[in-house]
Image (cartoon, rainbow, N blue to C red):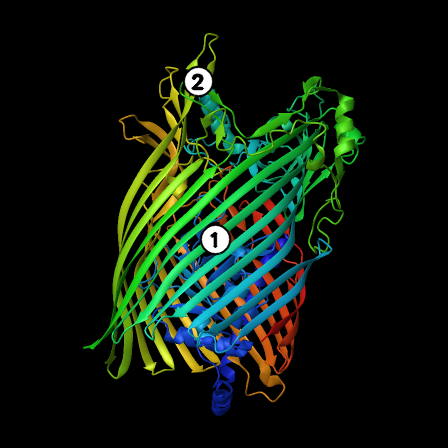
């Protein structure tokens, strides 16, 4: 396919560009050396501790200096280096760093992988304090969209590890530092106002930031205030097949499509007929079933997001040795997300006919016709009954978080001490609404075209935009409330003692204590052990023809009137501006409006009254998680000469104890044969359940730095044991659900059937954390303040990690002697990740004016993984580590001189594994992408005023996911281009 060829060609071209950048960086070195005096003069005012470093070139110099002086492997962004990037949040700034790979949502940077390790296994902190997870799912990865880049003084991405660092990052640690008021050299005032324009929305929204800082009382009291307001409108247009499933044998090929565990020895479909058990026989025959799209559909998501971030810092110099500070940070996010869906239901074999189907050589169904016979009874949801639907969902989301920190820094003659205490809380409240209309339509032709894009051909007389089409269909509304609270308390104390004895320079020691909690209430609702039904806060109301709903009888005519009254056309620019194939997708379609259903349905229960209590009974939380962590460390820093080569480094150990209590609900079911001889399953009751876990980790670390050419060519070696904790919900939540907080359940079999076990879907209370040994080797050539060439090799031996959805037989899951067959997450072992990082940056000061303002920064990362323990359920081949791209790269060119600053940045990554298994058991891969962003700033010199224009995703890139084979597209997302126009003033 042309799509595949286009994607494959991109990495090679960009890597060639990276190689050219590396060559250019080396080419100018002799000329750069001749200009050393000039460079030194230009940089006399640049200091590592400077609060605002003016100019792209100066801030890049500061980042080079941080890397050079660091005590482990680290890459940095500094001061205006963040503000000058064409990036609006921390995640989008981080993507420019070697080895960091960004995941996006609606075109915005959402989370990062470091050296191929997924976001949940990396630590993100701001001023030493954990960034709270906001989604309430039990994930540990931080949503970086909430961190405005204007707040930041510096960002360090630690890929190595030292004993004084807070544990939790197998991939690495992102350490964000904000400005401190006592560091100010003079009064600081800065404000930025801009307008944002998304070409898919055709509307301008505001963004503004203001920063003020000053010192008082003879410069002993410092105050720093920062506030950001951001009104963001983003959109995602989607072409989807959702999943690919094996429901029927369309082509009657003698070749298997896949193998099913336990039936590998059956060589022909006919040989399965020898199996007497009907279920087992069907499982055997399914090996010849072809793969067809489960729900081909079009979706349009529109997100209206309002974000407020404010930070205040007070710092007081009590004595010359002691300063104290207080930080307060407040974040609020109000979001309404609208989701329109236009879909054909192919979830069962009764929904289509195999006649006339088109199947490719890889057993993928790329053309089929849906069931042609109209149902004989109303309300039928088989065959052609209600096979087409148009839906609108509305997600009202409110997130509030606050962080309060008090700390001190004390410096004596030989002993220094620092510490802080922090309390943080994040609360989330959501209301999810849905209204759908469905139509009974026979003989819809579904074709899967180039790039896996679905298209629909409706039979004559059936127009989805005509309300009459829904006369024999149905309607349904849903309401799903949710409340989440996430908290953390954190105390940290560090001491440094200057030794200067033998080869030891300083001894560091200290401790840390953290207590975190996550409480989530979803809809609730359950049956108590004494058979009392506790109502859920969730509401589902479905229209059935010729029945009464909300006191009114729904006839065919009423259903048509409902569609006429509540439905409207979606925006008529679906996929506008996209340059690829979209098949026969319409510009827009008829969809119901959730805001207009009040006259037709009873919505009086659309509230949170039953979220925490219902009918006098307490709802059982979806999860209630508590985690207490205690840690202590000792680290020695040393320096000596080895064969006239200066060597410095550190060695240390950190000991960490983790205690976890995970609580939720357990639903018990009973399967039995009733009086009519039928096997039925009934709910016995739901009860609270809690599991505890405790473990201790000892984490040694060693970092060495060799000045092969003192202060110019530096080699580093690093070793450390690192760990990251499992999601607490994995200890208890149902493991066979796409929701990490689904209710665990167990079914007791009382049918008396031989070989049928009692079963559970549950978490795993015995899960071990992710643990790894990591090794780093790097070489950096610091040619001058502008120029760096570096190369690194890294290796991670992951001793334990977590595999999901695995059936384990005869498990004493409740530790009471009862054995169950349990679907639960388990530990894997032996995964190995290794890779190479290359980077180069320089300023072309040797060129004649005005070209001496040019500069370039390029980097490239190659990484692979093996022995991961994940396998493709279709092919049996081993899968890579989730989130890992084999190739990732950045090309950044800038011009910074006098009044002009121009920055162009390209970020690319190759194909990566998004999920080892979706609901159908197939792996999901994300295609490689390349994003081009740019920013131009014009400065009115000596006035503090500047004007800027910037653009994001200038090449109209899309995000495409597949289920292995290129034609098996699961989702193609296009989010358009974003533009910003604004002005800044700095004093």
Give whichever of 466, 929 is nearer the camera: 466
Task: Find residue 102 and name its label.
Answer: none
Circles 2 and 1: CB distance less than 8 Å? no
The quarter of the image holding the C terminus is bottom right
- How many marks overall? 2
Q: CA distance from mark 2 to mark 1?
A: 42 Å
Task: Find residue 531 and name its label.
Answer: 2
Q: Residue 177's x, y, as percent?
A: 44, 65
Relative horizontal placement of residue 167, taking residue 280 as reference (left or right): left
* Sequence-first disc among 2 and 1: 1
Relative horizontal placement of residue 438, taking residue 185 as reference (left or right): right
Question: Is label 2 or label 1 in front?
Answer: 1
Give whichever of 30, 247 is nearer the camera: 30
Give whichever of 462, 947 is nearer the camera: 947
Report crowding for label 2: few under 14, some 14 to 19, many 20 or more residues within 10 A (C-alpha): few
Query: SS for tag 2?
Result: loop
Query: SS for tag 1?
Result: strand
In the displayed structure, would residue 455 be above or below residue 6? Answer: above
Q: Residue 515's x, y, as percent?
A: 35, 48
Outermost residue to the top = 675
In the displayed structure, would residue 526 be above or below residue 19? Answer: above
Q: Residue 634's x, y, as percent?
A: 24, 63
Residue 9 seen from this side? no
Q: Where does label 1 land, which residue?
A: 402
């Amino acid at each position: 396919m042309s799509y595949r060829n286009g994607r494959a060609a991109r990495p090679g071209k960009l890597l060639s560009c990276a190689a050219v950048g590396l060559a250019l960086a080396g080419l100018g070195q002799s000329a750069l050396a001749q200009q050393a005096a000039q460079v030194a003069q230009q940089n006399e005012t640049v200091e590592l501790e400077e609060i605002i470093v003016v100019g792209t070139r100066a801030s890049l110099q500061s980042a080079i200096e941080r890397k050079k002086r660091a005590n482990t492997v680290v890459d940095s962004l500094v001061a205006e280096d963040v503000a000058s990037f064409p990036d609006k949040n921390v995640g989008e700034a981080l993507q420019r760093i070697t080895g960091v790979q960004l995941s996006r949502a609606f075109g915005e940077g959402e989370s990062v992988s470091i050296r191929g390790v997924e976001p949940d296994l990396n630590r993100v902190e701001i001023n030493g304090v954990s960034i709270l997870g906001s989604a309430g799912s039990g994930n540990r990865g931080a949503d970086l969209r909430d961190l405005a880049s204007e707040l930041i003084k510096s960002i360090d991405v630690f890929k190595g590890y030292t004993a004084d660092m807070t544990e939790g990052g197998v991939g690495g640690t992102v350490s964000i530092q904000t400005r401190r008021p006592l560091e100010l050299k003079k009064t600081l005032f800065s404000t930025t106002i801009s307008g944002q324009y998304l070409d898919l929305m055709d509307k301008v929204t505001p963004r503004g930031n203001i920063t003020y800082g000053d010192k008082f009382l003879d410069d002993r009291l410092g105050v720093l205030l920062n506030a950001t307001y951001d009104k963001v409108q983003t959109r995602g247009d989607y072409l989807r097949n959702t999943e690919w499933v094996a429901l029927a044998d369309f082509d009657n090929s003698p070749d298997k499509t896949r193998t099913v565990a336990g039936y590998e020895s059956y060589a022909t479909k006919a040989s399965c007929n020898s199996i007497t058990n009907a279920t087992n026989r069907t499982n055997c025959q399914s090996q010849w079933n072809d793969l067809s799209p489960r729900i081909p559909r079009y979706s349009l998501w529109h997100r209206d997001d309002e974000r407020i971030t404010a930070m205040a810092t007070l710092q007081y110099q009590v004595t010359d040795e002691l300063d104290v500070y207080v930080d307060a940070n407040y974040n609020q996010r109000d979001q309404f997300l609208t989701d329109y869906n236009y879909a054909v239901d192919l979830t069962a074999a009764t929904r289509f006919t195999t006649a006339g189907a088109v199947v490719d050589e890889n057993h993928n169904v790329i053309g089929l016709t849906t069931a042609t016979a109209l149902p004989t009874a109303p309300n039928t949801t088989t065959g052609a009954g209600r096979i087409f639907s148009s839906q609108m969902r509305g997600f009202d989301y409110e997130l509030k978080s606050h962080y309060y920190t008090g700390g001190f820094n004390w410096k004596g003659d030989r002993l220094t001490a620092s510490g802080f205490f922090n309390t943080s809380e994040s609360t989330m409240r959501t209301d999810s609404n849905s209204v759908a209309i469905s139509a009974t339509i026979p003989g819809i032709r579904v074709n899967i075209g180039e790039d896996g894009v679905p298209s629909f051909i409706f039979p004559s007389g059936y127009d989805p935009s005509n309300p009459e089409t829904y006369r024999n269909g149905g309607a349904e509304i849903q309401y799903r409330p949710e409340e989440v609270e996430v908290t953390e308390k954190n105390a940290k104390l560090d001491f440094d003692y200057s030794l200067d004895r033998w080869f030891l320079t300083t001894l560091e020691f200290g401790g840390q204590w953290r207590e975190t909690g996550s409480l989530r209430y979803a809809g609730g609702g359950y049956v108590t052990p004494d058979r009392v039904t506790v109502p859920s806060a969730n509401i589902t109301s479905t229209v059935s023809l010729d029945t009464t709903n909300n006191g009114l009888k729904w006839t065919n005519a009423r259903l048509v009137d409902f569609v006429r009254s509540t439905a409207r056309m979606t925006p008529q620019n679906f996929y506008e501006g996209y340059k690829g194939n979209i098949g026969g997708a319409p510009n827009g379609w008829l969809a119901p409006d959730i805001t207009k259903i009040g006259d037709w349905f009873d919505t009086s229960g659309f509230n949170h009254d039953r979220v925490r209590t219902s009918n006098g009974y307490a709802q059982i939380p979806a999860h209630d998680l508590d985690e207490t962590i205690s840690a202590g460390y000792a680290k020695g820093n040393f320096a000596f000469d080895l064969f006239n080569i200066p060597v410095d480094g550190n060695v240390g150990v950190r000991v960490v104890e983790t205690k976890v209590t995970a609580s939720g609900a357990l639903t018990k079911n009973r399967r039995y044969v009733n009086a009519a001889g039928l096997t039925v399953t009934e709910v016995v009751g739901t009860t609270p359940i809690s599991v505890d876990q405790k473990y201790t980790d000892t984490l040694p670390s060693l970092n060495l730095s060799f000045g092969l050419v003192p202060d110019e060519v530096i080699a580093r070696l690093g070793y450390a044991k690192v760990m990251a904790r499992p999601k607490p919900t994995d200890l208890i939540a149902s493991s066979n659900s796409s929701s990490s907080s689904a209710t665990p359940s167990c079914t007791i079999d009382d049918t008396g059937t031989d070989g049928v076990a009692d079963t559970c879907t549950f978490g795993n209370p015995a899960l071990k954390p992710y643990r790894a040994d990591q090794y780093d080797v790097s070489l950096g050539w610091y040619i001058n303040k502008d120029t760096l060439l570096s190369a690194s090799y890294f290796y991670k031996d992951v001793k334990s990690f977590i595999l999901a959805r695995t059936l384990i037989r005869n498990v004493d899951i409740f530790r009471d002697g009862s054995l169950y067959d349990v679907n639960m997450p388990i530990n894997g072992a032996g995964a190995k990740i290794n890779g190479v990082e290359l980077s180069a940056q320089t300023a072309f000061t040797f060129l004649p004016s005005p070209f001496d303002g040019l500069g370039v920064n390029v980097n490239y990362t190659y990484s692979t993984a093996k022995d991961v323990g994940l396998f493709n359920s279709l092919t049996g081949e081993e899968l890579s580590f989730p989130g890992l791209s084999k190739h990732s790269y950045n090309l950044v060119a800038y011009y910074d001189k006098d009044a002009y600053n121009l920055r162009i940045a390209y970020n690319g990554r190759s194909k990566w594994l998004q999920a080892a298994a979706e609901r159908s058991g197939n792996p999901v891969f994300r295609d490689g992408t390349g994003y081009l962003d740019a920013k131009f700033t014009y400065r009115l010199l000596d006035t503090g005023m500047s004007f800027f224009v910037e653009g994001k995703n200038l090449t109209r890139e899309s995000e495409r996911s597949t289920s292995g084979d290129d034609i098996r597209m699961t989702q193609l997302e296009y989010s358009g281009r974003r533009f910003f126009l604004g002005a800044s003033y700095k004093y």
